[in-house]
Amino acid sequence: MIFYYGLFLGILVYNFQQLEALNRTELVNFVALTSDVRKFYKSSSVLIVYDYQPANSWEFKEAVLTIIREFSNRNIMSQVISYATLDFTINFEMNVRLAQPANPLFMLYIHNSDNLDFFRKVTTGRDISFFTWFVFIDNEAKLDCEYPQGNPFNLEMDTRMIVKCEGSLKIKKYFSIFKNTTEVVDLAIWTPGEQLVLTDDDNLLQVKKDMKGITLRIARHKYLANEPNNAIANYLESLVNTLANISNFKTKVVLEVDQYGYRNATTNQWVGLMKSMDEKEADIAELLFSMSADRMQVIDYTMPLMRAQTRFYVKLPDTVKIRWSAYFQVFNRNVWAAIGIFLLLLSIVLTFMKNEHGRFVNVHSFFGNFIDVLGIYCQQGLPELPVNTPLKMLYFSILILSLILYAVYSATITSYIAVLTAGLPFSTYDEFLHNKAYKLVILRGSRDELLIHSNDWLLGPLENKMKKHDELPSNAYEAFQQACEENVALYANEVMFDSISEDVQCALGWLETSRIENQAMGLTKNSPYTETINYYILRLLNHGILSRMKSAYFYKLIQLPENKPNVISISEITPILAIWLIGVATSWIIFYIEILFFKKSLYKSKKPSHINIRHYTWRRYHLFLYKIYQLNLDTR
């Protein structure tokens, strides 16, 4: 009897150990599966949601400790919460960890229908797409895992929820397109003890391309349809229609506003289209918004569609003047410096070669030789011919070199003078800032109004130069029309100019700034369609369709002034006259200084002398003419 009792007790202990080992193996496999899901979604931690049951509290606590220990062994931070604290936990995670790129993974165990009802009640009216969810559904929950009725989990289109049902090895994906339906996608088949391999999210999004014909509300700018060249509106309309065709959704224009919208600094309220998007009156804003952190509080952006350089656009003057700097732009600074040094060296060499009897170099002789060499470079003759052969060879080499330089200079300066380019009234930002003749113009109701009133480093200093709010243009065509008709500088980006360039009625120049803007369409904040729309925009970009659409609607038009007969006025030959007048004035000043020095030397001499300065001047002039006459006789 004792033998049978001992045998029974041994078998009982053995079965209990086997059961404990079996439960532990299931828990380890459960942790491994959850770890694979966390790795797939790149979540920061795991929050285990349970239903506390006092009846089996000891077994439950032991299982929880085992799960936490296994997560810790895998270097994964985990925490256990109850359904009663789920509401508080969701609020905490959304408010405190909103700025973190990696969000926690909620591991949800649906034991019965009460758990499901409680979860539905807690998540009603909330966007659970902010988190990732891994749900285990027990058979007692009485939920059809293959075809759930309605939307029991309050899902959205971009909800990331992976589901495993009891008794099934299939790993499913739950999301919803319509509010009262649930879409189910089979992702993988899990084998216990092996790593779960989930396909890329691209597989999942391929299923999302069929949006079941849902209608998305579109918001547009009211004045875009009235512009002569509506390139931006046509491009965005074509893009939205393409997205609708490939993802099977419909569009309906429900809103047209006259302002892009910005935050009013006085009332701290949004105006224009931004206000409508904040109130969720539309799903997609079919406009190009300049991406900014301030607007991201109200809307979500699509992927950047444009990258635009900002500029100040100004009408070019009708008449073109020759700049004084044009005469010096033929050679760069290094070449001009080399020519000057070469002139000095040649003058010094000539001075030493002509100074045959004196030990010291005469300064007057050096300047005379310098004038001779400079005259050769300017294609002038020598006052007297050189006598010895070395001087003749040196002068000949100087003549050849000057001939080459003169030919190069003449050919280049002709291009600078013949092909005239119109210049802006100002060439730098500081010049525009201090130019009182030109006002600043921006689009009314755009983001630039917020920047100009918020001490922006670029537009803030120009606040006093901006026109009144009621006088600002409301669309691109009116903006460039003001730039052509008034003395204003339009602050805009190159995308806006390219879209309207064919209809601009004048030649515009621009001053580029260092600000580059990324532009994209807008969607309502936390929109469930953001992920899908961005996915297909990326596919259109990778296949070159976006580039083809841009080239079809936007034109890079370089405008030049009209070729009118250019009448030469006194202002265009001012540089030449200035050089001549400066030379004449300098020579007279030097001549007058020589007379003063000569007169002073006469008064200091020992012998009294009464010399008439006017008589001396005329005598010196006649002596100069006589030397020229003798020189002509010698040459004959």
Image (cartoon, rainbow, N blue to C red):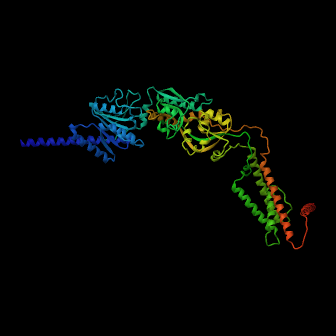
Q: Position of residue 376 (x, y in %)?
A: 81, 58
Q: Quadrant of residue 227?
A: top right
Relative horizontal placement of residue 158, taking residue 370 as reference (left or right): left
Q: Quadrant of residue 506?
A: top right
Relative horizontal placement of residue 299, taking residue 184 as reference (left or right): right
The vertical placement of 342 against 458, above or below, is below
The vertical placement of 164 against 613, above or below, is above
Q: Residue furthest bottom?
A: 606
Q: Position of residue 298 (x, y in %)?
A: 47, 36
**Can I make out residue 230 in this image?**
yes
What residue appears at the point 38 percent right and 38 percent down from the top-left corner?
131
Relative horizontal placement of residue 324, taking residue 634 as reference (left or right): left
What residue appears at the point 26 percent right and 40 percent down from the top-left corner?
26
Q: Nearer the viewer, residue 92 or 530?
A: 92
**Can I make out residue 544 in this image?**
no
Q: Nearer the viewer, residue 18 or 326?
A: 326
Total count of labels: 0
Q: Residue furthest left?
A: 1
Q: Position of residue 540 (x, y in %)?
A: 51, 34
Q: Quadrant of the N terminus?
A: top left
Q: Nearer the viewer, residue 493 or 3?
A: 493
Q: Nearer the viewer, residue 285 or 531?
A: 285
Q: Quadrant of residue 121?
A: top left
Q: Quadrant of the C terminus?
A: bottom right
Q: Position of residue 102 (x, y in %)?
A: 40, 43
